[in-house]
Amino acid sequence: MGEPTTNFPESRPQHRPADAVGPVPPGGAEPPAGRTVTAVTDRDTATDRDTATGGDGERAVTSPGGPHAPAGRAAAGTGFPGPWVPRAPRLWIEIVLIALSYWVYSLIRNAVPEQRDAAMANAHRIWSLEQSLGIAVEDTVNRAANSVTWLIVGMNYYYATLHFVVTLGVLVWLFRAHSGRYAAARLVLFSTTAVALVGYYFFPLAPPRLMEGGRFVDTVVVHHTWGSMASGDLANVSNQYAAMPSMHVGWSVWCGVVVALIVRRRWVRVLAVLYPATTLLVIVCTANHFWLDAVGGLLCLAFGFTAGHLVYRTPPWHLPRLPELPGTGRVPAPAGRHDR
């Protein structure tokens, strides 16, 4: 008998595609034609895992389009450049930018011609529209709040101060703890404020407290507080007929949405939701705005978020908490919790 014969499979030469990247897998197996193999190291995987979780349990901290998405890249299937990758903001630039922007906003807002007759006519139109909708209760709310002195005085000061203090505080918090989301959130706020100027120019509107007929109480004048730039001694340096849209509502809802969708602490999220709701009540109790002025503020905010989405392709809270490191395309691993 002859020696047993063993049949071995025929050895075939391995052909690597010209565009293949990375080492040949064990056993010489090649990927199907048209596919690319990319070598991934344990270090890369760990870094990307840290980036994806934010190190503190946040859901989404990768840049839109991936951690390596370059700034200004054209989004697939669109003619718009983007998404724009957040960069680290510079303190002195932000201080100058915010101060200059608010100065320009105030200058334009107060430079709009005070068309008293048109503003009064529009106020009566808004009031008639609310009556037809069954929501014209601002006068009742205003007089009820005015009957409680400590309450309405507190609301006057709330109206005068928190509008600026809370908004600036949220900007500072974003700058310090969520710098990767700061620029996108600031863009939303600035876009909201800019489009409000269009409303001030084309739709002059007297606030309820200035309507003729004695239906509403000007709580600032009655209680001698400084709860409104357009009442008392400051009335001559402020446009009294820029009530539509309400930026008190627009800015407060911006604060509430941004904070509530970023932080993890439940009590902070509750405060974030209560703040715009309280602001809405204050602007009505002090007779500074109609309900529909608040709707106008929400529409401006919707425009602001749309503008932000066109640039960053995602809302601020879905961006990385920290901006990417220059020249690396990666975001640094967070050092700890920053949702306070």
Image (spheres, rainbow, N blue to C red):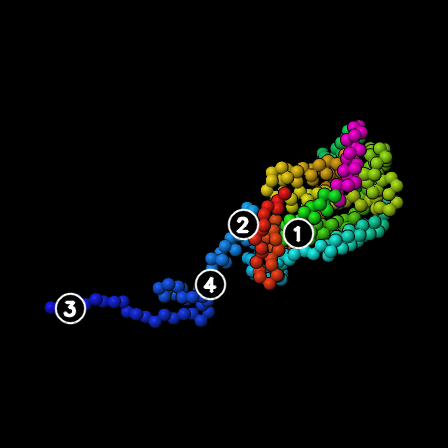
Residue 3 has which mark?
3
x then y, percent, for residue 223: 84, 33
Determine the image quadrant of residue 71. Answer: bottom right
Cα separation, mark 1 vs mark 3, equals: 79 Å
Determine the image quadrant of residue 257. Answer: top right
Q: What's the magenta region? A: 147-164
Identified at 63% across, 56% down, the residue is: 86
x then y, percent, for residue 231: 85, 40
The amino acid type found where label 2 is placed reads Thr
Left or right of 94, for residue 260: left
Tag 1 residue: 182
Q: Quadrant of the N terminus?
A: bottom left
Left or right of 84, for residue 284: right
1 or 4: tag closer to the N-terminus: 4
3 or 2: tag closer to the N-terminus: 3
The amino acid type found where label 4 is placed reads Thr
The amino acid type found where label 1 is placed reads Tyr
Q: Main secondary structure of the magenta part?
A: helix
Q: Which of 209 and 327 lies nearest the eye of the viewer?
A: 327
Tag 4 residue: 38
2 or 1: tag closer to the N-terminus: 2
3 or 4: tag closer to the N-terminus: 3
Could you classify mark 1 by the number of other residues whose Cα lies within 10 Å: few (under 14), some (14-19), or many (20 or more)?
many
The kind of secondary structure element at disc 1 is helix
Cα separation, mark 3 vs mark 4, equals: 47 Å
Identified at 54% across, 50% down, the residue is: 53
Q: Which of 153 and 315 lies nearest the eye of the viewer?
A: 153
